[in-house]
Amino acid sequence: MFAVVISTFNNEATLVEALAALVPASAEGVVREVIVADAGSSDMTEEIADAAGCRWVGAKGTRGARLLAGAQAARRGEWLLFLEPDTVLDPGWYREVSKFVERAERSGRGDRQAACFRAANDDLGFKARVAEKVSWLRSRILGIGTARQGLLLSRRFYERIGGHNPKAPLADADLVRRIGRRRMTHLPIRAVRRLGPETAPSKSRFRQGLGMVLFFLRVPAPVIGRLVGTSMH
């Protein structure tokens, strides 16, 4: 049914669990292949991907370039699912996804409908729950999806809107903006972010979220960079 694309860089601490969540879907024939598009990891990321039977794509450059290369390398799925290497989907997630795909295809909307999951944190405590609520509200009200939420769309739709732009300052947000709020379905599945050494601290995650909001408001990339303290390139 679909191929999974994961962009990595030194993610050995979290990739194992992320891939393990895909095993039941693979056994059911829902996930046809997993593409790992890597930016040049120096840890055990490649060995982990190989042991799990993933296809390895060396794709240095911007995040957008890696995701585009991963999508182009996928050969066995009519739909594409983009995930983060530290994101673990809820058990049984593929059943809900399969229903969505079947409904989209049956209604003739397979080439113009996408879906994302509900972002959740592995952190404990009040701040983590507040962050989840803020992410959910931002996603539903503003139509802003993040890489952490995952993104599912047909290959036809992906190619029709131009795929990931290697030159976009926020490739994921740029793609979601082109998809459009009305064509995005929010599935009741949690995409839980596991904590690892490479996981960004809370202040960094806040800046990333702020950057995405400003991007969707069409604030110029150089201005976003100055406001959130990153080059955004």
Image (cartoon, grey):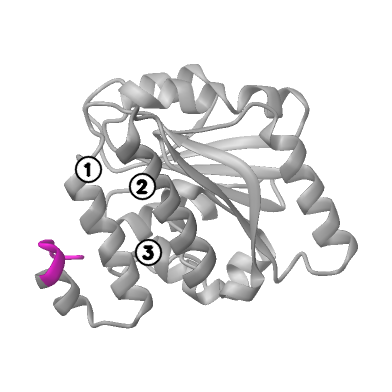
Q: Position of residue 35 (x, y in %)?
A: 51, 39
- Viewer-proximal residue, 26 or 150? 150
- The kind of secondary structure element at disc 2 is helix
Residue type highlighted by circle 1: Ser
- The kind of secondary structure element at disc 3 is helix
The label on residue 202 is 1
Q: Position of residue 9 (x, y in %)?
A: 28, 37
Are discs 1 and 3 less than 8 Å apart at CB?
no
- Viewer-proximal residue, 4 or 133? 133
Looking at marks 1 and 3 on the same chain, the residue that comes earlier in the sequence is marked by 3
Q: Is residue 109 visible?
A: yes
User: Residue at label 2?
Assistant: 131
Are discs 1 and 2 less than 8 Å apart at CB?
yes
The quadrant holding residue 115 is bottom right
Seen in the image, is 163 located left or right of residue 187?
A: left
Seen in the image, is 33 located left or right of residue 175?
A: right
For the residue carrying disc 3, how many other residues have a C-alpha within 10 Å: few (<14), some (14-19), or many (20+)? many
User: Residue at label 3?
Assistant: 171
- Viewer-proximal residue, 229 or 16? 229
